[in-house]
Image (spheres, rainbow, N blue to C red):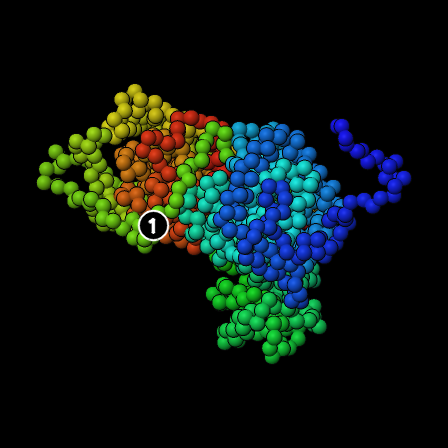
Amino acid sequence: MAGSTINTVQNIFQSMEYGPAATPSTATAQAWLDNHSRSLGLFIDGKFVRPADRQSRSLADSKGGHVCSTVCAVEADVSQAASSAVSGHKAWSGLSCYQRAKVLLRLVGVLGQHGQCVSELCELCEASCSPSALVRLLQYYSSWAQLRDTLIPNWTPLGVVAVAVSEDCSLYSLMLKVLPALAMGNSVVVVPGRSSAPPALLLAQLFVGAGLPAGALNVLAGSDMSLGAKVAQNPSISYVTYSGNKQDGVTLCKATAGMGVPVTVSPNIGASCPFIIFESADIDSAVDAVIEAAFKKKREVHWVLCVQESVLDSVVARLRLRMAGMKCVALHSEGDRVLVDTAVQVAQQQGATFVQSCAAPPSGAQYPPTVLCGAAPSSPFVVSPSPGPLLPLMTFRSNTEAVTLGNHSPHGQAASIWTEDLTLALDTAKSLSVGSVWVNSHSVSDPCLPVSGHKDSGTCTDGGHEGLYQFLRPSSSSSPLPRSSPVSMDYSKFGTAASPAIIPDDSDPASAPKPYLQFVGGKPCKSVSGCSVAVQSPGGSSVLAYCPDGGRKDVRNAVEAAVKVQPGWMKKSPSARAQSLYSLTKGLEAKRRDMAASVSVQTGLSMDEADTEVELSIARLSDWAAYCDKNQGGTPPLPQSGSALSLPEALGVVGLVLPDENPLLSMVTLLGAAIANGNAVVMVPSQKYPLPALAFIQVLQASDLPAGLVNVITGSRDELTAALANHSVIKAIWYWGSAEGCQYLQYTCTSPLKILHLFCQKEDGGKDWTKSHPSLLEEMWRNAVQWKSVWIPTA
């Protein structure tokens, strides 16, 4: 270009001019912070911005020294970041898989240069994450970026993804969501916590410097989790995922209810996890490991020590020996000391004995490592542990009792098993309701292993091949929830409106419409209320039948029946479940004419059209029968010695609120997906077209499915939805209904957490159930399972 000056190596050598100012590769974290005047702005559209008139909050280190301050974003900043993310998504998703992988792989070298700065900043901010862990994440997800179209065909990125974390969440947990979202071609808006904000801003700068398009990664710091709700409210956001403590996750779910954006949470902080020592364990190694996990590492989870009675004395003696001379552990605040003292007092009142490394100081934010021997499973310090260095110890006699103790907690995050008997270890691992199991090890992680939160520990899967699908959608489907603004609702009154209940007139049974029964526990029955509702003809000119008007007590009875049979059904071999589904298929084929008649009279379709729907339903059930023994997990390769298992498991009891479209075909599609994977089902048929589901009860009776596995309850959709949402045993709800119903479920299903798949039903038609696209069936299959990882190290 004319007039330009090319600064060649020879010119630089002759003039001996200074090079450019030091970048983070040669600067320390302190120098990087000083370069920003220790006041960090927001990272939007590939650069730091510091809007005027913004509040800021200060971050202190472990000794109380000032580290830096961060700007608190407002709605205007959210709009700017979302707009930048939309542009960034176009540029980033427009690259080929190879080009995206090349950018992510280039970051490995960049982190090699800047590793010291990143490490120092994480240490200053107490956002634990080693550069080697970040490098492993980048290597793993860069390869998935390369292979996305090859190994995950027919799936597309969601668009703009928002990733929010709590104040106490680690940088690793944040990047475990950011990197796979980027690898799949999404752009990301990050809402970090107080401690993870500075490292996240530094990494965003490094990412853009390595070639990430401007806008593909934006970072917005805030004062609390309300910023996450503001980000979710922006219509450009396609998906929100959260990691951290449960309280902030619940706050985010409630604040985003009714916005029409899917929200998933991974409460990976504060859970109670069992540390089980069997008599066949290497006791010395087990005791060393439990002391390291409970007292020496940063405690993101609370461990509960479970010891077999035959080796209790040996374990306690070794604990006393190993803990001798250990120093007091620093607490976060004086308030934590109050909680610790209260827990210790309660333990003393319940007869627990102590093993302490030293005497507790009379006051101050410190407390010695303490083992509370003789704890009961129902003790408050076991169920809701305090934040201090307290380790409850319980005993068990048999393997069954150990599993019962391990599953007693409402959390289902992780467990550590110590035994030299591999058969015992695997049997216990399969029986524990947790997402990660470490055999003769603890707190081991790798991105190749999927991590699902069981029970109250999460609604999504992170890591591994399986964790990529939360950032993708089938190419043939659209977003199930339309973006909207929350409506003003009294959540306590949802579903309480009286339904038009009718007591059928039995004076002339011959002329009265046919009364139907619902299906609970393998038996047709009336509703607990004894009332029925009229089912109108398609034109509304006549009454076709009377259906039971089910309610909360009917749901309770159905769940009780499902809970009894589901564990046995889940333990059946996949081939046995497949044979049961094939028998269900044969039963549907035998009742073909009756089922077609019920579809025709209910929907107004011709008999030929109704018969076509029955034919498609038969084929769909056969598809799910074939799916039973497919996709059964695997053994992912590990970067270190050892073996690992990745296992899909049933969710448990699933609530299905069925759609109006194709009432028979949609029902068998969702039912087949649920029970093929070992779940039990409580179904609420379409309130508009319930007769095909009620006629299907005859097919269920003739099949060899266990009684109680499938339950059918008719009545008011809203009332039954509220009953499903408020039942603590139900793990997941698949819902087709109104926007108000979707908002109610998002707001209500937070304690305990439920996995939600919500679809706002449209009057002009919705999902085309007649299409059997492979990615749609795979999506339903993945919605019906949760994943468990079992890590087995070797010497």
Residue at 62 percent across and 58 percent down: it is: 69
Please name the residue shown 61% across and 72% down the image: 365
In the rendered image, the vertical position of residue 311 relative to residue 182, given as above or below: below
Q: Position of residue 245 (x, y in %)?
A: 53, 56
Question: Which residue sits at x=34%, y=52%?
Answer: 491
Who is closer to the viewer here, 558 or 43? Answer: 43
Residue 439 appearing in the image? no
As shown in the figure, which amino acid type bears the numbered disc 1? Ser
Q: Position of residue 579 (x, y in %)?
A: 44, 33
Residue 498 placement, left or right of 26: left
In the figure, is residue 281 to the left or right of 499? right
Q: Residue furthest top?
A: 608
Image quadrant occupied by the N terminus: top right
Identify the residue at the far bottom of this view. Answer: 362
Residue 90 versus residue 446: which sits nearer the camera? 90
The residue at the far right in this view is 14
**Is residue 69 among the parts visible in the rendering?**
yes
Whether residue 430 is situated above or below residue 761 in the rendered picture = below
Residue 50 lies, with reference to residue 379, above or below; the image says: above
Of 274 and 768, the residue lying toward us = 768
Depth order, front residue of 303/439: 303
Query: According to the image, label 1 marks what residue?
Result: 488
What residue is drawn where x is 30% and y is 20%?
608
